[in-house]
Each structure stands twice: as C-alpha cells, then as structure tokens.
Amino acid sequence: MRLTAVIFDLGNTLIRQQIDDLVTLDQLTLEPIAGATEMLSELRCRYKLGLLSNTRQSLEHHVRRALVKLGWDGVFEGVVTSVDVRSEKPAQIGFDRVLELLNVAAADAVMVGNDMEADILGGSRAGLRTVFFSCDDADWQAQRNSACQPDYVVHNLADLPFLLHSIEASRLGGT
C-alpha cells in the first residue's frame, strides 16, 4: 500500500489557535504557523490533503473561506468540521468522513495534529498512522506521557515532507 493522503488538524497545527465561539473562522484574523504555506505547497503536489478540525460553530464553507484568506484556496480536497458531523474528535465519524471525501483508505493516510487525544488517539483508532506536531517544546513535554503515543513526532513543519517520504519509502520496502 502507498501513502496517498495527509489529513491535518487546523488549530495549533497549521494556524495559531483561534476559537470560533463568537464568530465563524472566516471572520477571524488567522495566522499561519511558520512554514505551513511552504509545506502545504510541497505536499499538495504529492498527496491528497484533508482537514479535520474541532470547531464551535464553523461549518465546512466557513473554513474554506478562511482558507482562501490564508492563500490556501484549493489546497484541501476534503474539509470536515466537528459541527458538520455533529461530533468532535476523537470520534471516528469525522475521520471516516474526511477519508471518504479524499477517497482513500485509512491505511493509506496519516493524521497530523497537536492534540494527543483528539488527533493522535482519534487517528489511531480510525486506522491512520499519526504524526504529533508541536513547535512548542513545553507542549510536547506536557503531552508526551499520554497513554496514547503517536507513530511519529515533528517539531518543525518543514520536516514533515521528508518524514512522509521516509514513511512511504519504508512501506514500499525502500530505504
């Protein structure tokens, strides 16, 4: 099997966390995490990209409008929010929906996120390989003793393309 898709969390993975409790994400000022735009540009040439985010009131169309403001229009083939599926990660329904939109099997995808329970436990239960991302060492130290452990860890988004290439090479029996 081949690695064909990468699914991302949004807050504190691709953008600085913003809570959409008063207004939807497209109405907020969003700040990309350092290196996110370049990394997404590189990965979209090789993989199908999906987005799965726990939101308070934002639906898919709100998130897509926010992505346009970030310059990420058309980057993600599948966008799913917890409001869309009426259930927050780590519930499997959101993972299943984004995999369906990407038309890939869980075994052919990885989940990248910053929350051990929502992203890593949820992704693992859904059958995905998992990558924990934290650009904050204190955050990693606080979460590293979680009962659920990621398959991989990255502290810089610029390292993700190389990691994914390594995962793919190992799955194909390469080096």
Image: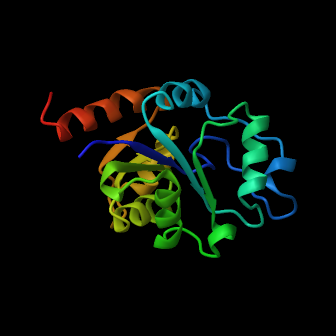
When the figure is inspected, residue 112 is found, relative to residue 31, above or below; the finding is below
Q: Foreground: 5 or 120? A: 5
Picture quadrant where residue 33 is located? top right
In the image, farthest residue toward the left: 173
| Left/right of residue 18 with respect to residue 41 in the rendered view | right
When the figure is inspected, residue 68 is found, relative to residue 93, above or below; the finding is above
Residue 138: x percent and y percent?
Answer: 49, 46
Q: Foreground: 125 or 153? A: 125
Looking at the image, how many numbered discs can be counted on the residues? 0
Residue 18: x percent and y percent?
Answer: 74, 51
Residue 98: x percent and y percent?
Answer: 52, 58
Residue 151: x percent and y percent?
Answer: 29, 50
Picture residue at 49% right of the left edge, 69% below the top: 90
| Left/right of residue 84 with respect to residue 150 in the rendered view | right
How is the structure coloured here? Answer: rainbow
Picture quadrant where residue 19 is located? bottom right
When the figure is inspected, residue 44 is found, relative to residue 57, above or below; the finding is above
Quarter of the picture containing the C terminus is top left
Picture quadrant where residue 83 is located? bottom right
Picture residue at 42% right of the left edge, 30% below the top: 46
Picture residue at 72% right of the left edge, 30% below the top: 71
In the image, farthest residue toward the front: 103
| Left/right of residue 70 with respect to residue 27 in the rendered view | left
